[in-house]
């Protein structure tokens, strides 16, 4: 007797659905992808009760005839693979699994218009019963899913609140909308219109940019820089947020490979690498990146929901992302996220009600120019009017021994002197290392530093590398080193702490420590230990020198932890605060 039996079709479909359809948003993704593959230029989406009661997608795509309509519910039936070649797929779908899977766990109804015959048909699977009848639709395809997971109620227990499920659905639409700016998307939830993103026919990246402003908001466009680089057969394009636009999760990192949304650890890691030293380790940049790879170099068939891909040469991919994004960030110059000054204005804006309330945001007692602020020291009116034309303006005061207040032609700036100096030092050492021209200073009295055995070992091992960073170290005695030279830009360094931090960095990285890969961290360590500490009084001339250095330093609008080094307040903003406009 046969113990092993083939599973019935319905069970096979349910098993497939278990992989592909995890929640309403995954079903929605399959439907919208089908509409995109059908060349629709407008897609309307309706969701009810978190998508559990209704997911409906209506498109104006090419539609299906009656024969195809019957066929599309068969397992592994697809119109998207013509020559049996999985390596050259231009459509989003290709597995022919989505519709039969959905049909096995929910009530499904598909109506489609057959242009050739000028007729429309409706096929439905309600409670496992298939039914075909004429339909009245006059364009494209309408797919309706009701009672998702009706037939696998266990799944329903894993559903989150309606709000969360709708958020997942919106994420799916956002991804697909960003990569398809020539399609209009609109979403209605529980009868309420949520968005209408009109298509744009602009062919260049400007079309994508317009879509990104619809999806991500105008602020993202103002707080990010464009990336466009082509190398080794790879093309990378997109927009990445300035480091000061950072989040506590990676949710706003939208990555695409050959226009297919993916969540790929390699790509996410590379993006993190590009922001190394520009933002704190537990913060995440905001980015939208499109990577184009010739299809021979990428396998898209490695994940049931097609969310991951495999690259033939992932090092090459990593490298173009790290260097492409980094280069764009460096070109951003002195821009910081507009979000920051907007948030500041929101905090400072108050109405009469606030004034009468003791909890008002604006506590005048806190705005206090310390006696150290000198409007007069070294003050030279002529040089003030020159300096004012610089982007970071002319220093007018130092407050609390920590912040420089400066004025330029557009308004006022508040600069965090410690954070700014830290960035300047870091970039100087970094570029000195990369261009082999670091300026060194000989110590008149060499520093003797005693280390633990572990630290001693790794420091001596990396001695030749550390010279390239300006640190000339020699073995002195058991577990003891002497430092003879240091980078000239480092000022009053505590070498004991610095060398221990560097040693820890090397140990943490493990046996394959490569200085160039940890450059930002090591330079960051150096910068951190020597920067103009908060609390140090500066002369006006020193303040201006710092501002001019910032202007000449890449990435100087944020410190190496991703916090802004300065905040701008335009005259317009100030007028707004005082209710003058
Ligand atoms: P796949 O997309 O992987 O081919 P699906 O199960 O999602 O598998 O769809 C099966 C087939 O049904 C598709 O290959 C396509 O021919 C057809 N189809 C599905 N949705 C639509 C649609 N909205 N418009 C036109 N054809 C569609
Ligand atoms: Mg599909």
Image (cartoon, rainbow, N blue to C red):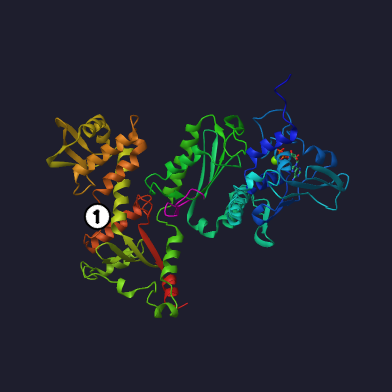
The residue at the far front in this view is: 1
Residue 86 position (above or below residue 523): above
Residue 89 position (above or below residue 558): above
Q: Hey, which quadrant is residue 399 in on the image?
A: bottom left
Q: Tell me the SS state at disc 1.
A: loop
Local crowd at mark 1 within 10 Å, few (<14), some, or many (≥20)? many
Q: Work out which quarter of the rendered image holds the N terminus and state it.
A: top right
Q: In this view, does 395 lie to the left or right of 108?
A: left
Ligand 2: which quarter?
top right
Q: What stretch is highlighted in magenta?
A: 238-251
Q: Position of residue 328 (x, y in %)?
A: 46, 47
Q: Is residue 572 left or right of residue 155?
A: left
Q: Can residue 90 be seen in this view?
A: no
User: Considering depth in this image, is 412 or 561 the residue closer to the camera?
Assistant: 561
Q: Does the magenta stretch include residue 421?
A: no
User: Considering depth in this image, is 488 or 78 the residue closer to the camera?
Assistant: 78
The residue at the far top in this view is: 1
Q: Where is residue 508 in the image (x, y as percent from the top left)?
A: 32, 36
Q: Hey, which quadrant is residue 469 in on the image?
A: top left
Q: Where is residue 521 in the image (x, y as percent from the top left)?
A: 33, 42
* Point 55% across, 58% down: residue: 217
Q: Hey, which quadrant is residue 573 in on the image?
A: bottom left
| Label 1, ligand 2: CB separation under 8 Å | no
* Residue under pointer 1: 532
Residue 128 position (above or below residue 552): above
Q: How many labels does the image show?
A: 1
Q: Does the magenta stretch include residue 243?
A: yes
Q: Is residue 493 visible?
A: yes
């Amino acid at each position: 007797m046969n113990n092993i039996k083939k599973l019935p079709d319905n069970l096979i479909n349910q098993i497939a659905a278990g992989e592909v359809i995890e929640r309403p948003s995954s079903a929605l993704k399959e439907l919208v992808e089908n509409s995109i593959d059908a060349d629709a230029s407008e897609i309307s989406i309706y969701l009810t009760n978190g998508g559990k009661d209704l997911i409906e997608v209506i498109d104006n795509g090419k539609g299906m005839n009656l024969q195809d309509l019957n066929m599309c519910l068969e397992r592994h039936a697809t119109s998207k693979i013509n020559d049996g070649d999985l390596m050259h797929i231009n459509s989003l779908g290709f597995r022919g699994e989505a519709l039969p899977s959905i049909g096995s766990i929910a009530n499904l109804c598909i109506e489609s218009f057959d242009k050739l015959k000028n007729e429309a048909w409706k096929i439905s699977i309600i409670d496992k019963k298939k039914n075909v009848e004429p339909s009245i639709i006059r364009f494209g395809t309408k797919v309706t899913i009701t009672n998702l997971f009706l037939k696998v109620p266990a799944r329903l227990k894993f559903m989150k609140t309606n709000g969360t499920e709708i958020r997942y659905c919106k994420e799916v639409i956002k991804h697909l909308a960003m990569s398809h700016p020539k399609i209009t998307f609109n979403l209605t939830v529980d009868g309420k219109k949520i968005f209408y993103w009109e298509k744009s026919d602009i062919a260049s990246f400007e079309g994508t940019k317009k879509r990104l402003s619809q999806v991500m908001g105008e602020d993202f466009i103002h707080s990010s820089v464009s990336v466009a680089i082509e190398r080794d057969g790879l093309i990378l394009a997109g927009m990445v947020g300035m480091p000061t636009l950072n989040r506590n999760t990676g949710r706003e990192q939208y990555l695409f490979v050959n226009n297919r949304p993916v969540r790929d650890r390699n790509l996410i890691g590379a993006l993190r690498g590009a922001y190394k030293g520009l933002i704190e380790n537990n913060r995440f940049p905001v980015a939208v990146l499109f990577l184009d790879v010739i299809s021979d170099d990428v396998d898209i068939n490695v994940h049931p929901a097609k969310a991951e891909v495999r690259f033939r040469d992932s090092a090459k991919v990593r490298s173009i992302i790290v260097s492409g994004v980094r280069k764009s960030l460096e070109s951003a110059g002195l821009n910081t996220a507009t979000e920051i000054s907007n948030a500041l204005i929101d905090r400072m804006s108050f109405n009469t009600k606030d004034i009468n309330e003791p909890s008002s945001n604006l506590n005048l007692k806190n705005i206090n120019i310390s006696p150290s602020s000198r409007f007069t020291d070294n003050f030279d009116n002529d040089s003030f009017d020159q300096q004012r034309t610089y982007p970071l303006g002319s220093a007018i005061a130092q407050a609390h021994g920590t912040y420089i207040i400066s004025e330029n032609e557009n308004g006022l700036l508040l600069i965090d002197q410690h954070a700014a100096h830290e960035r300047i030092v870091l970039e100087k050492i970094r570029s000195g290392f990369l261009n082999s021209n670091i300026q060194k200073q000989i110590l008149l009295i060499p520093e003797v530093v005693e280390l633990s055995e572990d630290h001693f070992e790794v420091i001596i091992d990396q001695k030749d590398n550390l010279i390239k960073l300006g640190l000339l170290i020699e073995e002195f005695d058991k577990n003891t080193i002497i430092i003879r030279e240091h980078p000239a830009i480092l000022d009053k360094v505590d070498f004991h702490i610095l060398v221990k931090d560097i040693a820890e960095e090397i140990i943490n990285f493990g046996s394959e420590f490569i200085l160039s890969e940890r450059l930002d961290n090591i330079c960051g360590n150096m910068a951190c230990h020597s920067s103009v500490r908060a609390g140090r009084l500066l002369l006006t001339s020193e303040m201006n020198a710092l501002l001019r250095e910032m202007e000449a330093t890449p990435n100087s609008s944020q410190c190496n932890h991703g916090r802004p080094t300065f905040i701008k307040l335009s005259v317009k903003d100030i007028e707004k605060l005082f209710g003058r406009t």
